Amino acid sequence: MCRQPVVVIGAAAAARLWGYRHVDHPAHPVVLARLGTRPLSDVEIRRTSVLEPEDWVARRDGIRVASPPRTWFDCATDLDDDRFEQLTEWVLDHHVRVPALIRVVRRMGDGGRPGRARARRVLGSRPAWQKPAGSGLELRVLRGLERRGVRGLVRQFPIQLADGVVVHPDGAIPEIRWALEVDHVTWHGGRLDAQADKARDRRLRAVGWQVDRVTDADVRDHFQSTIDELVALIDLRRSEFTTRL
């Protein structure tokens, strides 16, 4: 008796079920199906020769949804590099670790699968030790600075404070001891959080680091002027730091 082909909710439809950010809602349900699956009405079918048990999770209602790593991989087809990089950081921050993403890329083979080159390119561009950038806004700011010619930027650079505690600012230029933090005041950042941030900034200054902060509202509503201000602050810091040496 012939086994029924497996149909799995995938790509953007699965991303919506997992709560992924940086992925648009699909106009129609998207499913992954083994080669040879019959067409389904009102559904976008993406046929694949690789659809193993580790590629899906069965819900209590019996519906199969692509696993977080497989959902991430299939979304590479629909996003440009910048948005896929933001998605990658979000997935790493909320669902899986780097080895799980590497494994799914390797399992998908060396053929011309849509999105595979993007998945490999984006995943290969980040050091494995690097902590994920939780919101994607950090990435946008750092990429904006890089496009303006700012050199030496490192994400999540480890800085040891005087008491031995190690902190990881969103961005840093170690050669001039400059750090950047992106504050997410839209959905958190009350009085206690603000006090903790200011205390940490003082401790960073005590070991010779300058910390500049921008908010998520700055990035969303005044992106270009925010980048301009940060570039000016970096240039000033570089000049002052070089002069002291």
Image: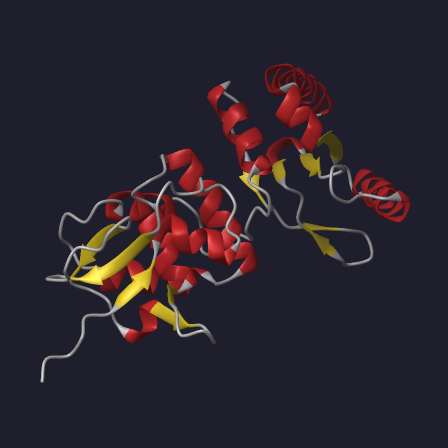
Looking at the image, residue 88 lies above or below residue 230: below
Q: For this rendering, which residue is in front, 145 or 140?
A: 140
Q: What residue do we see at 22% from left, 52% from top? A: 46
Which scheme is used to colour this image of the protein? secondary structure
Quadrant where the image shows the N terminus: bottom left
Q: Where is residue 38 in the image (x, y as percent from the top left)?
A: 14, 60
Q: For this rendering, which residue is in front, 7 or 229?
A: 7
Left or right for 166, reference 133: right
Q: Quadrant of residue 83?
A: top left
Q: Position of residue 35 (x, y in %)?
A: 13, 61
Q: Where is residue 244 in the image (x, y as percent from the top left)?
A: 74, 23
Looking at the image, residue 50 lies above or below residue 113: below
Q: Is residue 152 visible?
A: no
Left or right for 39, reference 31: left
Q: Is residue 75 visible?
A: yes
Quadrant where the image shows the C terminus: top right
Return the residue found at the far front: 41
Q: What residue do we see at 43% from left, 60% from top? A: 98
